[in-house]
């Protein structure tokens, strides 16, 4: 779906690439960037963004335990019900795909 969207709205795709490129510049390594992006998605309660961030974090060798620690860190800010929700999203996205 993402690729179809970018083909349809090429200017938005280029702008998005520039945003991501700029965000990658700085002292944070890839793992730290992926943890930060996941934390932001958790705080914003964006299920799709959490799923995407989990997949990208796994690709950057972030462990499930590290991702789950973010839930515990966020709990006092987002509340218990939201913490349960984002924990379930992380578990869903990190689970091996069944065929």
Image: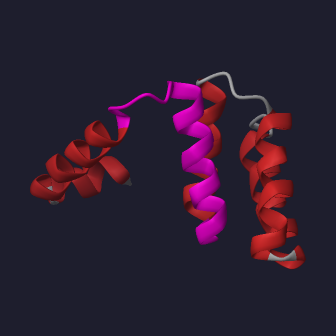
Residue at screen point 89% across, 75% down: 80
Q: Is residue 68 above or below residue 58?
A: below
- 22 sits left or right of 58 in the view: left
- 54 sits left or right of 23 in the view: right
Q: Position of residue 79 (x, y in %)?
A: 83, 77
| Image quarter of the N terminus | bottom left
Q: Is 43 part of what is drawn in magenta?
A: yes
The prevailing secondary structure element of the residues shown in magenta is helix
Q: Is residue 70 above or below residue 78?
A: above
Towards the viewer: 75 or 53: 75
Quadrant in the picture for residue 57: top right
Residue at screen point 59% across, 59% down: 41
The span shown in magenta is 24-46
In the picture as drawn, the residue positioned furthest to the front comes out as: 27
Q: Position of residue 40 (x, y in %)?
A: 57, 58
Q: Is residue 94 above or below residue 91?
A: above
Question: How many numbered marks are there?
Answer: 0
Residue at screen point 76% across, 42% down: 67
- 70 sits left or right of 1 in the view: right
Q: Is 23 part of what is drawn in magenta?
A: no
Q: Position of residue 58 (x, y in %)?
A: 66, 30
Residue at screen point 64% across, 71% down: 45
């Amino acid at each position: 779906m993402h690729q179809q969207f970018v083909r349809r709205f090429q200017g938005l795709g280029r702008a998005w690439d520039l945003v991501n490129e700029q965000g990658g510049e700085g002292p944070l390594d890839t793992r730290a960037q992926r943890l930060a992006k996941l934390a932001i998605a958790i705080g914003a309660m964006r299920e799709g963004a959490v799923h995407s961030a989990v997949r990208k974090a796994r690709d950057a060798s972030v462990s499930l335990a590290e991702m789950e620690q973010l839930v515990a860190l966020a709990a006092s800010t987002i509340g218990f019900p939201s913490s349960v929700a984002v924990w379930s999203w992380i578990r869903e996205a990190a689970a091996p795909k069944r065929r």
